[in-house]
Image (cartoon, grey):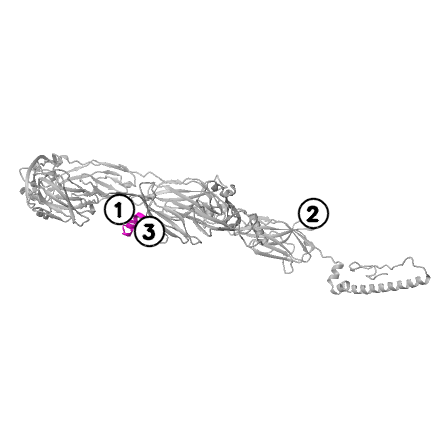
Amino acid sequence: MGIKALLIACVMLAGTGSAKRVVTVQSGPLIRTEGSHVTIWCNVTGYKDGVEQDFEWSMYLHSAPDREIRIISTSQPNYAYSVYAQRVNRKDIYVERLAGDSALLHITKLEAKDQGQFECYTPNTDGHYLGSYSAKTNLTVIPDTLSVTSVGQTLSKVEGDTLQLACEVSRQTPQHTHLSVGWYLRSPNQSAPPQDLVTLSRDFVLRAGGPYKQRFNTGDVRLDKTSSATYKLTIYRLQPADQGLIYCEAAEWIQDPDRSWYAMTRKQSEKTSVKVQPTDRDFSIQVSTERRAYAAGETLELRCSIDAQSVQDRYFSVSWVFSSSPVAVVGPSAVPVLSGEYVRREAAGQLTVRKESPAVHLLKLRWLRPEDTGKYICRVTEREKMPSGDFIDRSKRSRNVQISVQPLRSNITVSLSANSTEVLEVDGRTGRRPPQDLAAADREGTVRPGPSYRERSAYGEICLDRVRTDTFALSVYNALPGDAGQYRCTVTEWVPAPDGTTWESIGETTAVNSVNVKAVESSFFVAASSRTPSVTPAEDAGGRGESRDLVTLTQEGTLQWGDHLLGLGTRASIDKSPTNSNFRLRVNRAGRRDAGTYQCTAQLWRRNYDSTWTKVTNRTSNLLGINVLKPASKLRVHKANQSLWFVEDSRVRVNCSVTSQTSPDSQHTVLWYARKNEEPDDAPELLLKINHNSAFEYGAYAEEERLKSRVQSERLSPRLYGLTLHRAETSDSGVYYCLVEEWLLDPDGAWYQLSEDSSGFTQVVVKQPEIRLRVEEAESNVTANEAASIRLGCSVTSQSAKDSRFSVSWYVVRAGDEEEEEEGEGELECIFSIGHDAVFGNGNCSPAEGAGPDSRLQFERTTSDLYSLTIQRARPSDAGKYFCHVEEWLLNPRNAWYRLATNNSGVTIINVLEQVSSLQSIVCSNDSLFYFVFFYPFPIFGILLIALLLVRYKARSSSKNQEGKNGAPLLWIKEPHINYSPTCLEPLPSACTPVV
């Protein structure tokens, strides 16, 4: 493009006249969506006729507007740069020639990196340059945010139905754009182009396709915008020609600078398959039922189904006929009209006629009678209005459905069973004893006891219950030997009479069973046992008896405690099973005092029906020994060994963790032991002890090491104990561990030690802080004049602790001692020192020159880590090698300062220039002398020079006169010799006086 610009410039400079050649390109900025097909036209005019023009396309990125990126050329096949070469070779970018002087650039799939300024250049074909040969336009690439969504589905419709489909169309384009939305129908014949149903243009104008214009005008085809993004298509009165694939298509339009509209992107939704079945006016009917044979009293359901198209849009009336007699008629309004006695049966709830759905009608008969046996028919009539306005009726009847209703006959079977053929006295069993009447229940469920059992029934000893629909139970409680015998159960079956208000018996059945009653004493035994003959104090002891009365459970269920509970208190309880055959004595939290021999005594009582008791017999159990043992210890302490490193003056924490214990109520006594590192063979000493009752005791180790004020023990959780040493010292280094004793509380309230366990060893190392003292080590040379000030810096670049203090001293090796220093015999001289306590002269050396108002040394501390020493009125003797010596001091936990580290700075070499009195300095230091030497000699010198010239001139004149007199010329002339100094900076022999 540099050559192109040069040619154009030459044309402009030539000034040959007005431009003739003009290249125009589509005006911008052009806004297009990513992924779309973009075209840009370019035209050229004013060229020599008959010559086909070539076009070259390039682009410039906004980030590099002067950098040309070649895209494609109609004349050069390898014109494109590598960034576009692959897309050009794939024909993703190509040029379409519209005419000899017009071309169209195609970008089939626009990318975001294509955004920039596009240039169309036409090479010169005229032999001379005149006019413009290129034009540019801007292209902006934005994301494609158009979304078109419609759920694809398969629909089966009948001619005349209504079809509704919705399409969601949205976009997120920040530019001002318009949308066009349309619905299209593609017929089953895929080769045919899709038909335009209805479209909302970008100008918000609704238009229908050619075949649908009339239906659109009549309102059978509609396109409604129901929300900001929803477009609903509605087609009323579907026709067979409407079947096919229906889809929604939307396009996003933007207006270009030339006022034309351009579709940036266009998308289609999923297709919905619609099948339209032509309407068939014929119909068929069918009557269905579960079965054909019924018994009297059952329910009959008959359903008449109409098989036709668009049943809900047609008018049918249904008639039910029984053995040529009308039962009911149901018209299109679904209101039944009954005939004859069926009106009364419907009122009694024995008949139901209803329309379950547009195609199903129901006839339901309850409480069938034998006279309902016969043929049932369903007759359907359709009334249709003709185009002429007349109505015609088409009727059809179903096949006969033969229903038979059999009279009721009793077919029940009765069986009588009992829990056992032999029962114990005072137990209750099922059965009935003849010939006496025990109890009876009528069909309503009312129970009437027999005359001989009314009293026992009143007390609840005779009960008759209906357990299930077909099961009745007779219960005789507190059976007596006189209740033994043969029991008979008689069942009578009743059904409602046809009038629905009375009952009639249809049969009776009897069953017999024998029951024997045995005296209860023959099977009454007592035995004592325990599941835990040996228990621990934390468990329960079951069963204990001795000569002393502990507790009695009466026949009425009340407890009577004995006078000697042996310290059991409220720890004993009595449990009994639901059958009253098992009784349990439970001693909670058994103690060693609860060990012994237990025995129980049982008395058998009979409860009479009048709530009085009669003692039958009593029994005594065997002896049962109970032992109480200590619980097995489950105490475990964490035994992992570890090493902990701490810095002096920090807090040391050592934990003691109990991983398991015997009981949740266990208490611990924790003993902490310690041993110094330098004494590995010595036995550990007790540091402190915390009893299970939280009592605190110090050991000998705490006394010896003065740890009382610094040691702290905590119970962090029920199973975690911590030992803390505050302000740790190096002497605290050693091995620490804990010993845990487990204590339990026995039922009598006394504590006893169950077991003990020790933890792993914790190696604690307390050390001084890591030495990080660093002093600036850079060397430097300083040259100063005598009597000037010399500043020496000392910078601490890093320190070991934030609370460190520094002692700073300055040393010097004098200039005369440097050779001795190189030989290792140089003497260091301390010139200044300040201690860590900020006292002058309290450092690590004593300065030779004391501090005071006459001192030439000035000390400054500008920051916490920057020191400086200024030597005022420098002397030649101050020359030498200087460095600062820094000592870092820390305060230990016992409030004593100690030196942690030392370091020296780099050497600063000081040179002091001695003042020398020269003529120049003397002269320049006195104004009068300066003027006398440098100003006054010049006018004097000028006057003398003029005088010399005058004297010489006169001498020449006199010589000529003399030569003329003698008549012979002079062979040579003796000129005077003049010595002078131009500056007087170097003295002359005669004090700058010229000598002639």
Instruction: Return the x and y of residue 954 as percentages of the image width and height.
Output: 88, 64
Alpha carbon distance from label 2 to label 3 = 111 Å
Task: Using the image, determine if residue 218 lies above or below residue 922.
Answer: above
Residue 246 is left or right of residue 904, and the answer is left
Residue position for label 1: 238
Q: Point out which mark residue 207 bears.
A: 3
Alpha carbon distance from label 3 to label 1 = 19 Å
Residue position for label 2: 819
Residue 728 is left or right of residue 443, and the answer is right
* Label 2: few (<14), some (14–19) or many (≥20) C-alpha neighbours in 10 Å: few
| The residue stretch that appears in magenta | 208-236
> Which residue corresponds to the image point at 41% horizontal and 39% vertical from the top-left?
639
Residue 748 is left or right of residue 786, and the answer is left
**Nearest the camera: 450 or 929?**
929
Question: Can you tell which of label 3 and label 1 is closer to the viewer?
Answer: 3
Task: Using the image, determine if residue 840 lies above or below residue 685.
Answer: below
| For marks 1 and 2 on the same chain, the one whose residue lies earlier in the sequence | 1
Residue type for callout 2: Glu
Tags 3 and 1 touching, CB below 8 Å: no
Is 234 colored magenta in this rendering?
Answer: yes
Name the element at disc 1: loop
**Nearest the camera: 954 or 628?**
954
Tags 2 and 3 touching, CB below 8 Å: no
Question: Can you tell which of label 1 and label 2 is closer to the viewer?
Answer: 1
Instruction: Return the x and y of residue 455 as percentages of the image width and height.
Output: 7, 44
| For marks 2 and 3 on the same chain, the one whose residue lies earlier in the sequence | 3
Instruction: Return the x and y of residue 879 as percentages of the image width and height.
Output: 68, 53
Alpha carbon distance from label 1 to label 2 = 120 Å
* Label 1: few (<14), some (14–19) or many (≥20) C-alpha neighbours in 10 Å: many
Instruction: Work out whether residue 440 can be spotted.
Output: no
Residue type for callout 1: Leu
